[in-house]
Image (cartoon, rainbow, N blue to C red):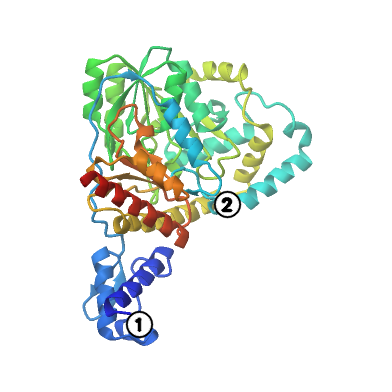
Amino acid sequence: MTSLLLYQRIAQQLAEDIRRGVYQPGERVPSVRKMSSQLSVSHATVLQAYANLEDQGLIRARPQSGFYVHQTAALTVPTPDIARVERPSMVTRSSIISQVLTDSRQEGVFPLGAAVPHVDYLPVRALHQQLAKVTRFHSPRAFSYMFSPGFEPLRRQVAIRMRDAGVMVDPSEVVITHGCVDAIHMALRVTTKPGDLIAAESPTYYGLLQLAELLGLKVIEIPCDPSTGMSLEALQLAANQWPIKALILTARLSNPMGGSIPEERQKQLLKLTADYGIQVIEDDIYGELLFEPGPSKALKAHDRDDQVVYCSSFSKTLSPGVRIGWIIAGRHQEEVVRLQTFSTHSACSVTQMGVAAYLENGGYDRHLRYIRQEYRKNMTAYQLAVQQYFPEGTQMTRPNGGFILWVSLPGRISAKELHVRALQQGISSAPGLIFSNTEQFNHCLRLTCGVPWSREAERAIMTLGMLAGQLCQEAAG
């Protein structure tokens, strides 16, 4: 084995240890002397390995002290470019979206595309205990219909949780839903009619595009900055040209870009939408997954004139399977309750009662602290792996929370073709074309960091990067 290959192996192993959290940010890695002794290699070989890790941004040298893991990942790839505004149009993406989602759900496929938390990050045992108690001790009510606006103890717990988002709301103002998409669906039903024009982020959550097509709505996409979210300047330009009825956006950790709108710009957005008479629908499903939640507030927290219909759920924090979300509809609440009463009644009785019991029992904040820490570590590991294995010219986002990563491929290569080839290797991704009704993101893809970092995850990213490199070579040739 040559010296070159040996130092690369040492660097790769230490990089893996850093990504797995063996060495935490700010911690000292083994000294050159110690590593040399442990591995029976020369000091020069270890120094070559450490220099390689410095180039990757994983460690840095401190004079007279040694080498330390970077406090934050030293990402050198740029962030994706902002989109451009295109004319409003009816949605035409549903069949493509459905096909991609069906392909990605194949058994045995490594899920790099689905924004679904891994079971390791869900409080499965605690939820199971509470659901068992509910079905054992409260079976008459648990197995009966639950009617809108939902289980009062759960609505009370949601109202308490909303305080952390800066929203002071009474339990009577909360309506329990079948997850966040159901909440958004009802919000659009009561604030728009077929043929209306709504504004959305660009790129946007593909489920919104499907809802818009279902409801016969036109969509205009407003460009978003990867860090600070929706461009207010672009929104104003669009509002000057077209009669936008409603705006739907995620102010904290948008999907798929992961941007968060700063507080001052949130206030400016509400003033702008008020001036143009635009109804605002806030999707805050990732709001509790900010790595540093601190004083961060939902857009609804700045709402003084009942402009914002707020939607969220526990799908990304507790369980996607329990299907518990909620909507705070303000002046539209009576319409929402009527719509829900004569369609779905309310969410499942057993799960409403079980989630309420879990929240009452405490431990949810501890659970949030745990998964935020895990997602932060995962995000760093996946970002550094994309930087290492994807072709030169790749761009990616820097989310400050959640577990989704937006990647822009060089040379405008087809992310859909990459999706097809990756599936043949047992890996799924979410190609950018499903996140827009335009053609602007066909070279982009969304990756999930919600799967624990492991050798299998690294192999999947490495394979995806290799396939992307092959597409680049084919395009160049």
For the point 45% across and 52% down, the residue is 372
- Residue 41 in the image: x percent, y percent? 33, 85
Q: Is residue 353 left or right of residue 282?
A: right
Which SS class for mark 1? Answer: helix
Three-letter amino acid code of the residue under disc 2: Gly
The image quarter containing residue 418 is: top left
Which SS class for mark 2? Answer: loop
The answer to whether one can see residue 168 in this image is no
The answer to whether one can see residue 41 in this image is yes
Out of 166 and 79, give the one closest to the viewer.
79
* Residue named by callout 1: 35
Three-letter amino acid code of the residue under disc 1: Met
* Residue named by callout 2: 363
For the point 31% across and 63% down, the residue is 71
* C-alpha gap between disc 2 and disc 1: 41 Å
Out of 127 and 161, give the one closest to the viewer.
127
- Crowd band around label 1 with a 10 angstrom C-alpha radius: few (<14), some (14–19), many (20+): some
- Residue 124 in the image: x percent, y percent? 62, 50
